[in-house]
Amino acid sequence: MFQKVLIANRGEIAVRIIRTCQMLGIQTVAIYSEADADAPHIKMADEAYLLGGPRVVESYLHADKVLDVARKSGADVIHPGYGFLSENSSFAEQCEAEGLVFIGPSSDVIARMGSKIESRKAMQAAGVPVVPGIAHSLADEEVAVQAAEEIGFPVMLKASAGGGGIGMQIVRNADELRKAFAGNQKRAASFFGDSAMYIEKYIENPRHIEIQILADKFGNVIHLWERECSIQRRHQKVLEEAPSPFLDDETRKKMGEAAVRAARAIGYSNAGTVEFLVDRNKNFYFLEMNTRLQVEHPVTEEITGLDLVAEQLKMAADYSLTMSQSDINPRGHAIEARIYAEDPMTFFPSPGNITKLVFPDGPGVRNDVGVHHESTVTPFYDPMIAKLIVKGKDRDEAINRLQNALSAYEVEGIKTNIPLLRKIADHPAFQQGETTTNFIEQYLQGETAK
């Protein structure tokens, strides 16, 4: 096993990784920006190094500075968490060249799966269902219109290198597509350095369901069943659960097998997630593959009893999987609610000083947290400050625990999305499992947060 891990991240995921490393007896190295000088992950780690100013390009996204800390500290492995450098194939390649172990698949697999066009081609070759679409970069808006007319409107215009909904837009006719094309190209070039666009058929009112996989370096691949992540706002996940209340056993089995087939086809290793769109008839289509740990990984941990960070470290250290598919027997139901520092009416970030912070507790309640009661939430980073995870013997009990935990949550000094989360948890449609990607627009649009 490794001696010292550098965590190339911040907030709750850095804390999460440090805790597993402590359990395994591995020393930890934290990095931080000037804005994070009082962050909990710094105090928890064995060593901590200042990278630079508050902007991500000066700190968490500055690959050379991160690698310099790895050299100074004597770290032998880098865990990127999620976001920042986690799916940066160039950074993974730099780590490989330095003799550092990068927690994740190889740099070439990251590059291949980072391109929506290339990943789509790979999945088609592996026999994994994909959304009908055009699997090549579109030269201009007229080519895009021609392609869309062949597929049939509505379509989803997407950035090949995109993520988080950036460079993505639903268009329902040729005029809308012409207007959307250039703007989305510019956004894609600005955020990802790649303006390539492609088109897929838009699936009306779908579910977003993903399969967690583990793959060692010896060709062993298993899946850990599914997570439903359908409740989203602006293509960003808000609440996730496992298992999905929508899938039947046959569809669940087929999706798991497809995810394993996808991982094998590209020579994948370490933890990863294969994401699917599922229509009302339970037809499923490959959406993308995330070559990292997911924000919502705790719900899988809760129903399987596994520590996914520990599994990542073991596989990266050339351990083979110690379990087979038949060993994975999920129990109970888990739900994760993302706690954001944002105005629940406008959804704008709400930076400021936290003056009071009380977390819920009790049976089946878990808090993954990256702040404390005197933390300052800055405008420089994603406004997620914590994750509330609950588990019950079944979905009804999990929802009940979620409602109670959200009611017990206390945050003062900043605004949070807790009122929105309470509305979701209390809504009859959510309680009945009607959790499509349009849930918030359909049931909560225009409501005043209380």
Image: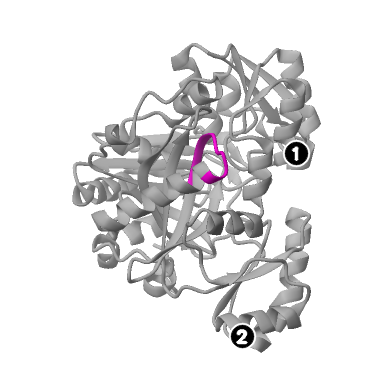
For label 1, the crowd category at 10 Å Cα-Cα, with few meaning under 14, some 14 to 19 and many 20 or more, is: some
Residue 165: image x %, image y %?
A: 59, 61
- For marks 1 and 2 on the same chain, the one whose residue lies earlier in the sequence: 1
Q: Does residue 114 appear left or right of residue 288 in this picture?
A: right
User: What residue type is disc 1 on?
Assistant: Ser
Residue 79: image x %, image y %?
A: 60, 28
Question: In the figure, 141 relative to 8: above or below?
Answer: below
Q: Please tell me which residue is depicted at 66% across the width and 19% down the height of the picture.
A: 48
Question: In the figure, 136 relative to 330: above or below?
Answer: below
Camera sees residue 223 = yes
Question: In the figure, 386 relative to 66: above or below?
Answer: below
Q: Which residue is mark 1?
A: 90
Q: State the quadrant of the C terminus.
A: bottom left
Which region shows up in magenta?
A: 265-273
Residue 161: image x %, image y %?
A: 68, 56
Q: Does residue 215 appear left or right of residue 240 in this picture?
A: right
Residue 181: image x %, image y %?
A: 72, 75
Q: Please identify the quarter of the rendering in which residue 441 is found.
A: bottom left
Q: Secondary structure at mark 2?
A: helix
Residue sitting nearer the eye, 14 or 68: 68
Q: Please identify the quarter of the rendering in which residue 78 is found.
A: top right
Q: Which residue is mark 2?
A: 149
Give yes or no for residue 254 being in the magenta stretch.
no
Q: Does residue 288 appear left or right of residue 325 in this picture?
A: right
**Disc 1 to disc 2, C-alpha distance:** 37 Å
Residue sitting nearer the eye, 322 or 338: 322
